[in-house]
Image (spheres, grey):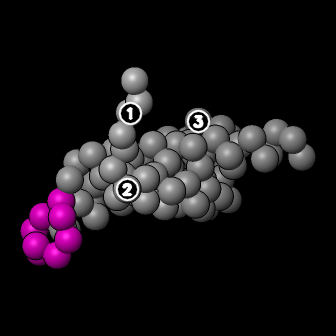
Amino acid sequence: MSIKIAPDKKKHFVVGIPLGIFLQLVASYFFSGLLIPILLAFFVLSLICYGFELFSLITGKGHADNMDAIAGILGGIVGLGIYWGMLAIR
């Protein structure tokens, strides 16, 4: 059994990875500790992903799909993990 993932979901996932890395970098720069920067980066990541879909829905530009937002958030979570993983091996 193979799971078919739509190409646009893959695109949202892949775009979410650098977005997650960037947001974590910015949050870690402005806030010390571990929990606050992670939660802040995740919150802003979620706002951006769902905000983009909401913008598409309101303006009619593009196709609004909540699964696109979820794919972007999942990619962003991978990006957050990459950021912390790179710090751990330094």
Could you tell me if residue 81 is visible in this image?
Answer: yes
Say whether residue 15 is left or right of residue 82.
Answer: left
Q: Tell me the residue at 82%/39% (across/down).
A: 88
Please rate how many residues cluster around mark 2, counting C-alpha atoms within 10 Å: few if below 14, some from 14 to 19, many from 20: few
Which residue is label 2 attached to? 7
In the image, 30 versus 71, the foreground residue is 71
Please rate how many residues cluster around mark 1, counting C-alpha atoms within 10 Å: few if below 14, some from 14 to 19, many from 20: few
At label 3, the amino acid type is Leu
Q: Secondary structure at mark 2?
A: helix
Let me know if residue 59 is in the magenta part: yes
Say whether residue 71 is left or right of residue 80.
Answer: left
- Name of the residue lying farthest toward the front: 1
Q: Secondary structure at mark 1?
A: loop
In the image, 30 versus 19, the foreground residue is 19
Q: Tell me the residue at 75%/41% (across/down).
A: 85
In the image, 26 versus 33, the foreground residue is 26
Say whether residue 42 is left or right of residue 25.
Answer: left
